[in-house]
Image: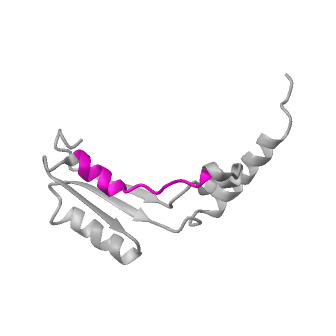
Amino acid sequence: MLRCGQKSIIFLINNGGYTIEVEIHDGPYNVIKNWNYTGLVDAIHNGQGKCWTTKVFCEEELIEAIEMANGEKKDCFCFIEVNVHKDDTSKESLEWGSRVSAANSRPPNPQ
């Protein structure tokens, strides 16, 4: 994308873990090291082409980042990491995780 001069905006939603997976099957393997995603994109970019990355932590910062990506940085590949609380997920997703957990915990259906 960088090499071909893409002018896309990518949003990475970072909740620092596997919230739904914890609902399905909790365990220490769900505790992950939080990556520096913008740093990874910056490293791949390596100063070649037009690339802009940022991290946001609240709604106001997100609005500013979107305005920047659509304005001053519109000729760049834009990568916005949106940091949210680890439990910031929909009720429906959590319910789905619980249903999957229940289905995974019953004996197989011999057919």
Task: Answer above or below: position of 20 versus 86.
Answer: above
Color encoding of the figure: one colour
Q: Quadrant of residue 31?
A: bottom right
Write the residue at 75% across / 47% down.
Answer: 101
Kindly give the residue lying farthest to the bottom in the view shown: 60
Task: Answer above or below: position of 4 versus 16.
Answer: above
Write the residue at 36% across / 54% down.
Answer: 37
Write the residue at 20% across / 50% down.
Answer: 7
**How far across and down, in percent of the image, does residue 97 sit?**
69, 52
The question of residue 107 being in magenta is answered with: no
Q: Is 95 positioned to the left or the right of 31 in the image? A: right
**How far across and down, in percent of the image, does residue 64 sit?**
28, 73
Q: Taken as a whole, is the magenta stretch helix, strand or loop?
A: helix
Residue 105 in view (yes/no): yes
Write the residue at 61% across / 52% down.
Answer: 30
Q: Nearer the viewer, residue 103 or 53?
A: 53
Quarter holding the N terminus is top left
Q: Quadrant of residue 55?
A: bottom left
Numbered marks: total:
0
Q: Nearer the viewer, residue 5 or 19?
A: 19
Q: Is 110 positioned to the left or the right of 40 in the image? A: right
Quarter holding the C terminus is top right
Magenta region: which residues?
30-44
**How far across and down, in percent of the image, does residue 63 sit?**
33, 72
Kindly give the residue lying farthest to the top in the view shown: 111
**How far across and down, in percent of the image, does residue 62 sit?**
35, 70
Residue 8 in view (yes/no): no
Q: Quadrant of residue 92?
A: bottom right
Q: Is 103 positioned to the left or the right of 39 in the image? A: right
